[in-house]
Structure formats: C-alpha cells, structure tokens
C-alpha cells in the first residue's frame, strides 16, 4: 500500500530518515578515509625504491585496502537510495526484548555502540524473512538453533531515498511486492532480486557448500539469478576461507556472460571468474585453437526436415551419422576410449632398452617398465617419469661406485699380472702405464656419462602434447577402431574419426573435442597449473555432456559444483545431458549430489506460459517438468497468418510500432535460424531501422530491439517477443525445444507469425 496510508508510516519514515542520515554520515567518513588512503598510496608509489621491501609491502596492503574501500563506497552509495527492503520483528526465546531488524543489501553498524542498523540479507537471522511465517520461528546461526517468535514481516519500497510503499505480509504471501517487481519491464541486463527471493530459491542459495547440487528449473524460474546470489551468499558466509577467485561461473557464451555481468557487482561481489568451457579448456591446454562455431552443427540438424528427432529418424544418412558420432564423442564411452588410448600410449611410452652406462646395465628395461606400468600406475604418465628419474639416479649413484671400484680392481690385477709375468724393463713399464691410462679414461667416461645419462634416457621418451596425441589418434583408423571395440559401432567410429580429422586438418577443432583433450591432458601430463577454484557454477548445464562434467570434476579436484539447467531447453541434446540420472550416477556417484527442482516461473505471464507448456508437452518425455507461472496475466497469445514473408515483416513492424507507442522498448523478433533472421531483417530495414541482428559473434549485449535466432535467445528475456516463421517448427524434438525457448523469452506479450497452413505444433498453442 502507499506508505502514507500505513498506520506505522510516521515511525517508519523516521526510521528511514535516521538510517539514511547514518548512511550518509558513514559515506562521508569513508570518502575521507579513502581520500587519505589514495594520498598515501600516491606518496608510496612516488617514493618507492627498488630496495625497500617494507615500503613495497605497505603499498600492497594499502592497494588492497583501496579495493575493499571502493566496494564499501559502492555499497554505501546504493544504500543512500535504498538502505533496506524489509523488516522483521523477532523475540528470542527466554528474552524479553523484541528486536526490530531492518534487512538490506549490506550491513551497517553504529560505531558508538555496535548497534545493528541494517542487517545483511545473507546473515543467518535474515533467513527469518525468507523462510519463516509469523508465529513460532527459528533460524540457524553458527551458535546453533535460535528459536523465538516472529511478530512482524514488513516490506518497503524505497526509491531514491523516498519511502514509497509498505507491505505487511501476514503468512508467507508476499505476492503484492513480487507482483510489482515482475510487472516491471525487462532490463538490458539481469538484475539482483534480494528483496523478493522465494523460499524454494532461498534453499538453493543457502544450500550446503560442499555438496554438489543439480537444479532442474523451468524457463524463467530464476536459475541464473539465484546462481549468482548463491555466490554472493557463500562469499559472505565463508569469507575466511573463500575468496572471489575461489568461484568460477561457466556459461554458454560471451553474450550471455555480458548479459549477467551486472548482478554480482550489484551484490557487492567482484573478481569472480566468468568464462565459457572453451576458454577454460584453452587456458588449461595452453593453446589457442580456432573453434568451429558450435551452432553450425545445430543448424545442420535444424535444417533436417524432421526436426532432428532421433526416434523418428533423420532425413539424411550423413546427418544421422554426424548425430550419432556427436553423441559418441560426448559420451562416457568416449571417456573410456580415451582411457584405453592412454593405456596403449603407456605401453609404447618408454624406449624399449636397458638403462646402461659404459655398456653396463644399470636398470634393465623390464624393471623400469614395471615401475612405470605397475608401481606408479595411478599417476599421470609424465609425472611417472619424474619418479622413474629418481629411481635411475639412486641406482646410478650406487652402480657408479661399484663400476669405478671394479675398474680399479681390474687394472690393479692387470698391473699385478704384468709384474709377475714380465721382466722389469721398458716394455713392462709401457704396458703398466697403458693399463692405468685405460682405467683412468674409463673412469672419466663413467663420471662424465653418469652426469647426463638419466637426462639422455628421459629425452628418448617421446612426450607429446595432449593435442598431438589426440591428432595422432584421429589419424589412425585401426587404432581408434580397436580402442572402441565393444563400446561403439564401427561405422560411427569411422565417421567420427574421418570428420574429426577433416576439421583438425583444416586448422580447427569443434567444441566436442575439448572434453577429450583436457581429459587426455589430465591422464598423460597431469594438471600443474594452479587452479584456485573451489566452487564451480555452471549455467545452462543441459547443453553440457556428462563427459565434460566428468573431466571438469577430475581436473578441478576438491571443488564443489552447482549445476543449473532445464532439460526442456536442451537444444544441443545431441551433445548434452539426456537426463539428470546420468549426471548423478556417472559423474557424482561418490558425492551424492543434491537434486532440486524449481517449477515456478517468474518471467512469463500465465497466457504465454500456458501456450509454451502446451508446445513442450508434445514431447512425450517423463523427464519434462512443466513450469508454473506466477499469478500474472498479460495479453493473450495470438497466431497471426500472413500470405508472404514480406507481409509478415510488415505486420511485425506495425506491431512493433504499436508497442513502442505504448512505451515498450525491449522487443525481440525471434526466427528459427540466422538465415531466416537475415531474410526477415531485410524486409524490415526501412520500417524498423533500429532492429539489431544478433549473430552470436558479439561480446556485448545491448538489449533494446533485436532480431535473434532461436538458439541464441537462450537465457535472455524481453518485454515482447514476436516469433517469425512459426511454420518452420516441425514436431521433431529439437524444433519443439527451440520454439519453447523462443516463447519463454517473453515477459508480457508474445505473438507467433506464420505463413501457409497451421502446423501440428502451432495448433497445439491453442490446445
Ligand atoms: N524471486 C524473484 N523475484 C523477482 N524476480 C525474479 C525472481 N526470480 C526470478 N526473477 C526474474 O525472473 C526472470 C528469469 O530469471 P532467470 O533468467 O534467472 O531465470 P532462468 O531460470 O535462468 O531462465 P531461463 O532458463 O529461461 O533462461 C528474471 O527477470 C528474474 O529477475
């Protein structure tokens, strides 16, 4: 309700003013401290001499302080507009005083008496707001369970320092507040939602840090948003043990990373690494690859007349083989093929010769090989060499002494024999000198050779990079077939090898090659690179393969994973996850992951969600969990028929004009493919010149008015979506998922434009 109408308005207004006043005072004090610190840093930099380690340390410390102060300042600036968003009144069991706690994005304490003015939303006590009902309530803090009575839950809308609305929430419902958030327009970037986090989302945000977590969440259920809030929460809760660098977010592409880039800074979190799987893998391999556009393969399947439905058959044999070969390359069977390959490499890794010095065997080949294949079996191949080097050096040290002693004994005996068998004289003297010289020469050779014998032996071991090993395998049909025995059909293996070799020889690799490559590196070389990451968050994980996840888990040891995805949006299902069971069982069997679902969708109106649910239900799949929209109505979904593409483009241009006049600025025209986007954009250039084409090559997401292929719209959202060319979606699995993704991008309005007859899929929209 408008704040002024609330019975407690006066008291709340006073509190709001008091808090703002304190925030401003703290801001001024912090600004002054920052100014002084900046001066100190300047001075230190100016007087920094190369030999004073003390001033260097001082400079480092002050620079760090500068960073954290900047963050504090940013939080304080935000608080000057909106210091808090909620209040809870709680009386702890056994205590007589009621605490009135105001919850905001950051905590603030009064310096004089340490009285809490604002409680951070991540503090344990703030859980009362997110989880508890009025009445008996509890929260868990490091000291244990705190029971008590919750007598008030209140929400505030404070904008630019002005108290505008107050909502008292009796039981758990906070719909009014949520509705006012959801009714707003889409931003160009994803935003924070601390004031309206829902119970099921809160459980994910605050879940146990060390247990892997899989979240199946419907389109618009807040997966991306809560993944970022979880990072902010974990950093706050484990600030002593985790740093922002301990986190890594893996997302599908740079455009998406840019789209989500503002949430963490808004939550006061900086320096969390955000990457794509390809970039991560290239860093690890220490090599820059030219990567084939992953969407090219998707497009080749999209062009399939049957909409790539493996159950119905693909219309062209070559495409069918490509499909099956991709499934194989991303499967756990391919992981086993890589392991078999390393077992093969193992057997030819060492030179088949004894380790000798001066023709004397120091370590026989069989013994070295036994160390390599048996004793150090569990180590990466290259790491085993280091151990073997130690063995060779130790044995060589002992043997060298023995050899030198033997040479001395041998020459002494020879001298003795010469003395006994020959008359003294010049001849005998010459032979004795010869024997001693020979001995000395051999000893010097032993000394000299032993210094480099081990390194020369190691040099003869052929160590290639993971990339070279992989390349070699893709060029060796017989070997790949042998390694694949019992795991895959010969025809598929052959196709996989040939097309992979072709890509490699043309100077490229494809996304699906990265998991085998990094896994080969792990098995052959081991991972020396310091990876500081302890928490990995993967968004849109449905497009990851189990092999990818397995390789990541092996490489980034001792880290925990938060995986978020939606099988209904699995448009790369040929390389992605088919069901969550395989992830639980094949990847995380040893760690018993937590599996949670989010059904409530916060993005889309009831009308749009109903239509999208009807489309996705065409897939007869038990794994599908339908989304439940938050109770929010929008315009009805319309199917609009045109005679031609030109007419369709005109109709959409008219609709965009109408929307613009109503103040709607975030609009997307979504076509199935990029080529279709280009064609439609051609017709709309004059009427909607500001329509920007998204091709997938962009690093930055601008928002506004865009025309985008369905597969690139994943993760994004718009106030209004116009789906162009509805007739292009067949009832094959991939096409249905693409249309579902496109439809669920809309917040308030969505229409489908088509030419020709209504298809089965379009008919389903009206159910
Ligand atoms: N508790 C909430 N309060 C307010 N808005 C929310 C809440 N949860 C999610 N949203 C909003 O819903 C929209 C969808 O969120 P988000 O993009 O994180 O969902 P998603 O599950 O990742 O979607 P998709 O899988 O379809 O890409 C965003 O605008 C987000 O701000």
Image (cartoon, grey):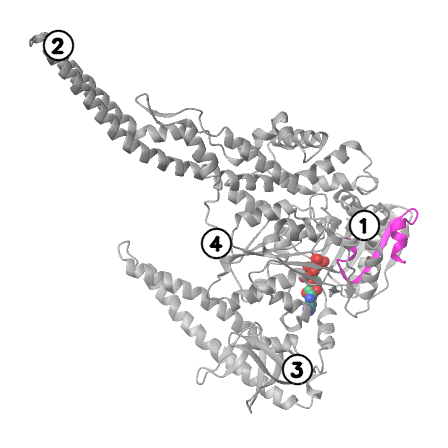
Q: Is residue 198 visible?
A: no
- Mark 4 or 1, which is nearer the eye? 4
> SS for tag 1?
helix
- Label 3 with label 1: CB-CB less than 8 Å: no
* Magenta-colored span: 742-767
- Label 2 with label 3: CB-CB less than 8 Å: no
> SS for tag 2?
helix
Residue at 31% x, 31% y: name it: 396
Q: CA distance from mark 4 to mark 1?
A: 40 Å
**Which residue carries the number 4 mark?**
532
Q: Residue furthest right?
A: 757
217 or 380: which is nearer to us?
380
Q: Which mark is residue 208?
A: none
**Which residue carries the number 2 mark?**
421
> SS for tag 4?
loop
9 or 198: which is nearer to us?
198
Q: CA distance from mark 2 to mark 3?
A: 115 Å
User: Dot 1: few (<14), some (14–19), or many (≥20) neighbours within 10 Å?
Assistant: many
């Amino acid at each position: 309700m408008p704040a002024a109408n609330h019975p407690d308005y006066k008291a709340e207004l006073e509190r709001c003013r008091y808090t703002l006043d304190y925030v401003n005072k703290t801001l001024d004090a912090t600004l002054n401290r920052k100014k002084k610190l900046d001066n100190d840093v300047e001075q230190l930099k100016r007087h920094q001499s190369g030999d004073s380690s003390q001033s260097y340390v001082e400079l480092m410390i002050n620079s760090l302080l500068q960073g954290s102060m900047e963050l504090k300042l940013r939080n304080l600036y935000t608080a000057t507009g909106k210091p808090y968003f909620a209040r809870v009144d709680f009386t702890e069991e056994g205590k007589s005083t009621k605490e009135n706690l105001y919850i905001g994005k950051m905590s603030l304490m009064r310096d004089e008496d340490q009285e809490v003015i604002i409680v951070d939303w991540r503090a344990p006590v703030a859980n009362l707001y997110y989880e508890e009902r009025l009445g008996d309530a509890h929260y868990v803090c490091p000291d244990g369970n705190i029971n008590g009575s919750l007598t008030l839950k209140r929400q505030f809308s404070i904008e630019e320092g002005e108290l505008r609305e107050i909502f008292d929430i009796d039981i758990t419902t906070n719909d009014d507040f949520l509705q006012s958030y959801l009714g707003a327009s889409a931003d160009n970037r994803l935003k924070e939602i601390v004031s309206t986090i829902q119970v099921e989302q809160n459980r994910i945000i605050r879940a146990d840090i060390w247990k892997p977590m899989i979240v199946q969440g419907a389109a618009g259920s807040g997966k991306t948003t809560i993944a970022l809030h979880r990072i902010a929460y974990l950093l706050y809760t484990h600030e002593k043990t985790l740093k922002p660098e301990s986190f890594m977010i893996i997302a599908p592409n740079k455009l998406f990373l840019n789209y989500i880039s503002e949430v963490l800074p808004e939550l006061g979190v900086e320096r969390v690494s955000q990457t794509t799987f390809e970039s991560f893998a290239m860093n690890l391999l220490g090599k820059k690859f030219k990567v084939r556009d992953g969407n090219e393969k998707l497009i080749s399947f999209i062009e399939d007349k049957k909409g790539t439905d493996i159950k119905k058959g693909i219309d062209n044999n070559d495409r069918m083989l490509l499909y099956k070969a991709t499934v194989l390359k991303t499967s756990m069977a391919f992981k086993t093929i890589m392991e078999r390959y390393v077992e093969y490499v193992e057997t030819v890794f060492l030179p088949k010769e004894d380790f000798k010095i001066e023709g004397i065997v120091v370590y026989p080949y069989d013994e070295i090989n036994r160390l390599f294949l048996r004793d150090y079996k569990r180590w990466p191949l290259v790491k085993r060499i280091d151990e073997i080097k130690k063995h060779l050096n130790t044995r060589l040290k002992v043997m060298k002494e023995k050899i030198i002693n033997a040479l001395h004994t041998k020459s002494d005996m020879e001298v003795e024999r010469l003395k006994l068998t020959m008359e003294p004289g010049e001849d005998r003297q010459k032979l004795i000198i010869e024997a001693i010289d020979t001995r000395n020469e051999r000893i010097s050779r032993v000394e000299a050779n032993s210094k480099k014998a081990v390194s020369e032996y190691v040099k003869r071991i052929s160590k290639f990079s993971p990339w070279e090993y992989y390349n070699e395998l893709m060029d060796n049909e017989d070997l790949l077939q042998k390694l694949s025995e019992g795991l895959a059909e010969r025809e598929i293996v052959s196709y996989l090898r040939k097309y992979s070799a072709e890509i490699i020889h043309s100077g490229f690799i494809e996304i699906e090659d990265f998991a085998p490559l990094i896994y080969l590196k792990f098995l052959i070389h081991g991972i020396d690179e310091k990876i500081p990451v302890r928490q990995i968050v993967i968004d849109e994980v449905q497009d990851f393969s189990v092999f990818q996840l397995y390789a990541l888990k092996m490489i980034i040891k001792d880290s925990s994973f938060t995986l978020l995805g939606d099988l209904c949006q699995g448009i790369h299902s040929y390389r992605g996850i088919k069901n969550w069971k395989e992830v639980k069982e094949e990847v995380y069997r040893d760690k018993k992951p937590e599996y949670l679902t989010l059904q409530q969708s916060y993005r889309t109106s009831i009308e749009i969600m109903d239509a999208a649910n009807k489309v996705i239900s065409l897939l007869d799949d038990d794994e599908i969990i339908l989304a439940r929209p938050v109770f929010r109505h929008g315009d009805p979904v319309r199917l609009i028929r045109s005679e031609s593409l030109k007419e369709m483009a005109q109709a959409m241009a008219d609709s965009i004009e109408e929307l613009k006049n109503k103040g709607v600025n975030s609009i997307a025209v979504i076509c199935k493919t990029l080529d279709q986007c280009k064609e439609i954009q051609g017709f709309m250039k004059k009427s909607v010149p500001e329509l920007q084409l998204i091709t997938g090559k962009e690093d930055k997401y601008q928002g506004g008015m865009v025309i985008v292929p369905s597969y690139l719209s994943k993760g994004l959202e718009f106030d209004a979506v116009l789906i162009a060319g509805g007739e292009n979606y067949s009832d094959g699995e991939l096409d249905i998922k693409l249309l579902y993704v496109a439809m669920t991008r809309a917040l308030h309005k969505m229409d489908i434009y088509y030419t020709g007859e209504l298809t089965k899929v379009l008919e389903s929209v009206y159910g």
